[in-house]
Amino acid sequence: MTAETLPARLLPASAPDALPPYRDLIDLDGWSPRDLSALIARAAWFREALGDPKRRFETLRGQTMVTLFYENSTRTRVSFERAGRLLGADVFSVAAASSSVTKGESLRDTIETLQALGATIIVVRSSQSGAPDVIARHLRGAVLNAGDGWRGHPTQALLDLFTIMRRLGPLAGRKAVILGDILHSRVARSNLWSLTAMGAEVVLCAPPTLMAPDVVAAYTTRPVPGTGATRRITVEPRIEAALAGADVVMALRLQKERQQAGLLPSIREYSQRWGLTPERLALANPGALVMHPGPMNEGVEIAPEVAHSEAAVIEEQVTNGVATRMAALEMIARARAWA
Ligand code: CP
């Protein structure tokens, strides 16, 4: 079934006044199921509206959005910029590698400079966990986290949630497996907040050296806001046992740039023992979704036959990113009474 043939009843689209009242988007740890559902429903509305390619919106008319990227990106930066333009913002891109950051300018001075140039929204990607929090202290406008260190990538988790719910409906009773380099993954960390808040059981599967040993305690001691439910997370290092009965399999990129020497015997052995192959995927439930935040190392964490199979919703994740980021931008605009 393609995205276009999905039954619409799975995700009723909602009006903007249901959006949660957050003035920035830093991470999803404080988000309730109600907050998440409202954002996803609004993303569904935008996704449908974007069926008309001429459609434009005025939500961010008069606002200036800067994408400030200290790390490389394709899909997050482009989809944020597209979302901002579709909502009527002026959009500028700053790549740290070609900016005065290379001359030693601090994050604070960079933000104050961009603000003096009219920036009212900053979308930031940084290798430093906590960079969006620093920006929030110095910017009068809004900050959205496009990935900070290992800490969080909230819009990726929101678009993942949208993609899953658009395909499978409610998550209660569903099993989602996050497979691979969990230690270095901000995608896994943000997804843990949102998937568990929506009632999924999350199974983490990784080699012992790429597991984040403190992650289960860090999340399970934080009940779900709004319901008080305990987050259901288990660690299952045996890949076959982890995949058995899965409804969602989220493969993670092996982050070679963050690897310290000695974490893995070799990429080849990693691929053989931990790669998502057709044989392993067959252990999951019929109709299970294969996801990957991208960029993929095909043949390492995921076999090409799986990445391009009927089960894969990887391109759909990218498409859904625009609608999801439009909903996130509309959220901060409404919270700030811009729209
Ligand atoms: N998923 C993701 O963050 O991809 P990019 O690095 O291309 O933005």
Image: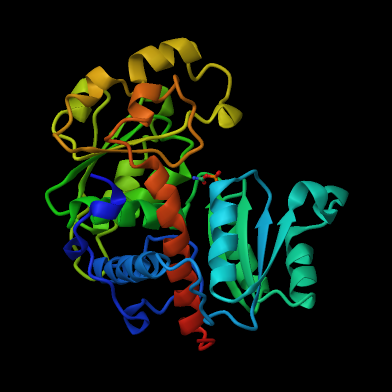
- 77 displayed left or right of 5: right
Asked if residue 105 is positioned above or below residue 289 in the image, the reply reads: below
Q: Quadrant of the N terminus?
A: top left
Tag count? 0
Question: From the viewer's perspective, is 26 left or right of 21?
Answer: right
Q: Going 32% across and 57% down the picture, which residue do you hit?
A: 162
Q: Nearer the viewer, residue 18 or 75?
A: 75
- Where does the image place residue 76, in percent across and percent down from the top left? 54, 52
Give 184 or 66, whichever is nearer the viewer.
66
Instruction: Tell whether 186 sits left or right of 237.
Output: right
**Could you say where residue 194 lies in the image, as x and y percent from the top left?**
31, 56
In depth, the one of 243 and 32 nearer the eye is 243
Q: Is residue 238 visible in the rendered structure shown here? A: no
Q: Position of residue 127 (x, y in %)?
A: 62, 45
14 left or right, relative to 23? left
Q: Position of residue 278 (x, y in %)?
A: 27, 21
| 56, 44: nearer the viewer | 56
Q: Quadrant of residue 124?
A: bottom right
Task: Farthest residue to the right: give it.
Answer: 103
Q: Is residue 51 above or below residue 100?
A: below
Q: Residue at x 43, y 66 (%)?
A: 50
Q: Residue at x 36, y 51 (%)?
A: 160
Using the rendered view, name the quadrant where residue 22 is placed.
bottom left
The colour scheme used here is rainbow
Residue found 46% across the figure and 24% down from its top: 298
Above or below, 304 against 324 in this view is: above
**Does residue 225 appear anywhere in the picture?**
yes
